[in-house]
Image (spheres, grey):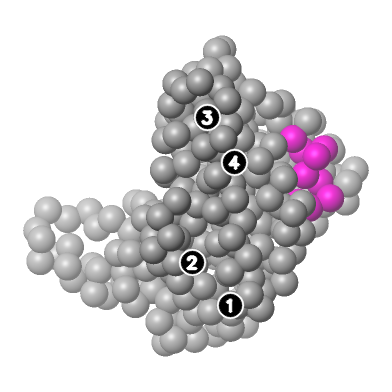
Amino acid sequence: MQFGIMAMQMNALIPPVNNPQDAMQHVATFSHAGLVRKLYEAGFDLIELGGDLGMWFPQTFSPPAIEELAQLKEEVGLTYTVHLPLWSVEPSTPLKAVRRGSVQALVDCIQATRPLAPQCYVLHATGALAAEFYRMNLPSAGKALILHQFQQNALQSIQAILEETGLPARQLAVETIEFPFDLTLEMAKRLDLSICLDTGHVLAGFAGAVDLFSVLEQVLPRLAEIHLHDCPIPQNADQPAYGLDHQPLGSGDLDTARLLDRLNKAQFKAPIIFELTVLQALSSLQTIRQLRPHLVS
């Protein structure tokens, strides 16, 4: 199995300084390839690049930075995936102008990273606004209507992304996020997209009162990436476990052995990304070695 790590390591991105001038210097001299090299040296050759880095480090996806990432890939044998931007991006909003801008931001990220030949692109098909309405205490019929509207808007945005980039639909993986799982799966089927299964999000209840292994069976035919992290299952299905996901394996309610066995039986070879810190990811790898040593190279 392919185990990797996200490049969005906050401790590496936020400078440990108190002087504003030093902070500005950190931003100005930030090296995307330098960050990825450190992750490789920590033991990971599968890296999920974070599209949101460009918000704070404008040079992150510039042509010279992409060339450095490409050279590093060839030098040490890396594999990349790309998590498309999600902060400030609203591909499902009812506001057409904002949707257009969101589509452009996503298209720009795809086009910039194409030279790296990412194995897949991960997309949050709906944004923070849809999640906010999903959490609201609204009459069921009205809420369903609103969520379906967000879904339809997302479908329009995704269709535009595919048309503008020429990206094969199965190279775009919609993630299980804070939006009803059935609507997310329906989007994937409608446009023949792939799925990114986020274990912590599902365990936390973000996608609704659904069982992780039931979700897994439904998405396996489309599963292009897994975001692997642990989380306790909330006692009340109406109260998702906010802030309790993104924990190392063994610290929540994920049945890691069962998950690994099912993926192994399915001969799953796609990327499995630890959405964790480096230390948490290394700890989680050790947990996997203890449970199923033959699955870790």
User: Residue 163: horizontal and vertical position, in percent?
Assistant: 63, 75
Residue 229 magenta-highlighted: no
Whichever of labels 1 and 2 marks the residue nearer the N terminus, that label is 2
SS at mark 1? helix
Are the residues at dot 1 and dot 4 in contact (C-beta closer than 8 Å)? no
Considering depth in this image, is 219 or 32 the residue closer to the camera? 219
Q: Residues within 10 Å of mark 4 (few under 14, many from 20)?
A: some
Whichever of labels 2 and 4 marks the residue nearer the N terminus, that label is 2
What residue is shown at x 80% (from left), y 39% (from top)?
218
In front: label 2 or label 3: 3
Are the residues at dot 3 and dot 1 in contact (C-beta closer than 8 Å)? no
Task: Name the image quarter holding residue 199.
Answer: top right
Considering depth in this image, is 136 or 254 the residue closer to the camera? 136
Left or right for 236, reference 242? right
Considering depth in this image, is 205 or 135 the residue closer to the camera? 135
- Residue corresponding to mark 3: 143
Q: CA distance from mark 1 to mark 4?
A: 24 Å
Whichever of labels 3 and 1 marks the residue nearer the N terminus, that label is 3
Q: Which residues are magenta?
A: 215-223
Residue 280 position (above or below residue 195): above
